[in-house]
Image (spheres, rainbow, N blue to C red):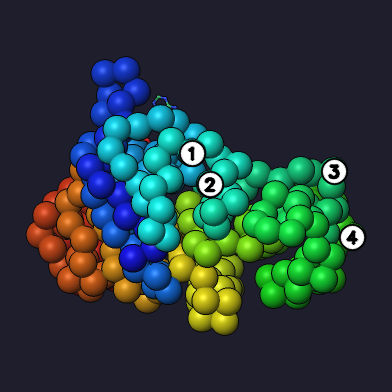
């Protein structure tokens, strides 16, 4: 196991956003998280990456990381992207990826690694372009590239396909597979597209109101009556 959450709970005032949640991600896998809007998915990432204090415990790579601040979490090898692409619009693509390289573990800024990443995510030709001028797919690749620049052991993606058309989705799916297979990085992905999750993931966790509904192979999850009731609806049964 590379990531383990034990009875994690997060309250915002009277709202319990994450409610006694436990789950395990195996090293090398692509692990999916889905659930209705407001289920607590992004909050789970915010807890893992040290944005808020919480009850319970999180272990990463055999080590207790509960309560570590975000910069320490980046150093242990956890990288994430955000639901809304966040870039520095006036920086070039290359500089933006260098920022990730500077924050990562270990060794600091590494120009050769930045070049490798530009090639890997397919942004070589846009390297001197200002990030504000990238199209949606470009911005998504940049966010993933900046996360990869920290040399993570695990990459956590928050709805990377949001707003994308079918061609862009395919391109991002190919990139995510390559990150997992060629770079050997464990991937956790929050996504609403069930088809993406059934094709990409080995395990899928469904949460609703901060609680686990089920966790299994994606095809089983997509046919689970509890999941169809709370999240998918009849039309989606079978992972369509
Ligand atoms: N910093 C915060 N302060 C107060 N409430 C918050 C905070 N962050 C999240 N919440 C609340 O916690 C609940 C879970 O939010 P979260 O963003 O984790 O959901 P989500 O599953 O990612 O939803 P979506 O699919 O819409 O992205 C929501 O009710 C949200 O309003
Ligand atoms: Mg979210």
Question: Please, what secondary structure does the residue beneath circle 4 have?
Answer: loop
Q: Nearer the viewer, residue 182 or 238?
A: 182
Q: Is residue 21 left or right of residue 75?
A: left
Q: Is residue 137 visible?
A: no
Q: Quadrant of the C terminus?
A: bottom left
Q: Residues within 10 Å of mark 3 (few under 14, many from 20)?
A: few
Separation of disc 4 and disc 3 at Cα? 11 Å
The earlier-in-sequence mark between 1 and 3 is 1
Q: Are marks 4 and 3 in contact (CB under 8 Å)?
A: no
The earlier-in-sequence mark between 1 and 2 is 1
Q: Nearer the viewer, residue 190 or 73?
A: 73
Residue corresponding to mark 2: 73
Separation of disc 1 and disc 2 at Cα? 6 Å
Q: Is residue 208 above or below residue 30?
A: above
Q: Position of residue 200 (x, y in %)?
A: 40, 73
User: Which mark, by number, is residue 68?
Assistant: 1
Q: Residues within 10 Å of mark 1 (few under 14, many from 20)?
A: some
Question: Please, what secondary structure does the residue beneath circle 1 have?
Answer: loop
Q: Are marks 4 and 1 in contact (CB under 8 Å)?
A: no
Q: Are marks 1 and 2 in contact (CB under 8 Å)?
A: yes
Q: Please give the name of the residue rendered at 34% of the width and 23% of the height, measured from the top-left corner.
A: 12
Q: Are marks 1 and 3 in contact (CB under 8 Å)?
A: no
User: Which mark, by number, is residue 48?
Assistant: none
Question: Please, what secondary structure does the residue beneath circle 2 have?
Answer: helix
Q: Position of residue 162 (x, y in %)?
A: 50, 54
Residue corresponding to mark 4: 128
Residue corresponding to mark 3: 90
Q: Is residue 210 above or below residue 236?
A: above
Q: Nearer the viewer, residue 89 or 185?
A: 185
Separation of disc 1 and disc 3 at Cα? 31 Å
């Amino acid at each position: 196991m590379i990531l383990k959450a034990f009875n994690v709970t997060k309250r915002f005032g009277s709202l319990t956003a994450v409610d006694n949640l436990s789950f395990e991600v195996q090293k090398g896998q692509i692990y999916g998280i889905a659930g209705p809007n407001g289920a607590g998915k992004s909050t789970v990432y915010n807890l893992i990456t040290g944005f808020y204090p919480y009850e319970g415990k999180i272990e990463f790579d055999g080590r207790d990381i509960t309560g570590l601040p975000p910069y320490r979490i980046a150093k242990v090898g956890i990288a994430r992207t955000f639901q809304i692409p966040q870039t520095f619009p006036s920086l070039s693509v290359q500089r933006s990826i260098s920022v990730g390289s500077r924050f990562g573990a270990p060794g600091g800024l590494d120009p050769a690694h930045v070049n490798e990443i530009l090639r890997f995510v397919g942004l070589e030709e846009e390297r001197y372009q200002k990030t504000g001028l990238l199209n949606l797919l470009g911005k998504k690749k940049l966010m993933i590239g900046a996360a990869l620049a920290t040399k993570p052991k695990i990459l956590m993606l928050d709805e990377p396909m949001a707003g994308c058309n079918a061609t862009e989705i395919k391109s991002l799916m190919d990139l995510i597979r390559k990150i997992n297979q060629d770079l050997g990085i464990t991937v956790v992905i929050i996504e609403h597209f069930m088809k993406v999750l059934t094709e990409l993931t080995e395990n899928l966790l469904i949460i609703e109101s901060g609680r686990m509904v089920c966790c299994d192979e994606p095809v089983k999850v997509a046919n689970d009556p509890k999941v169809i009731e709370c999240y998918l609806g009849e039309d989606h049964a079978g992972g369509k």
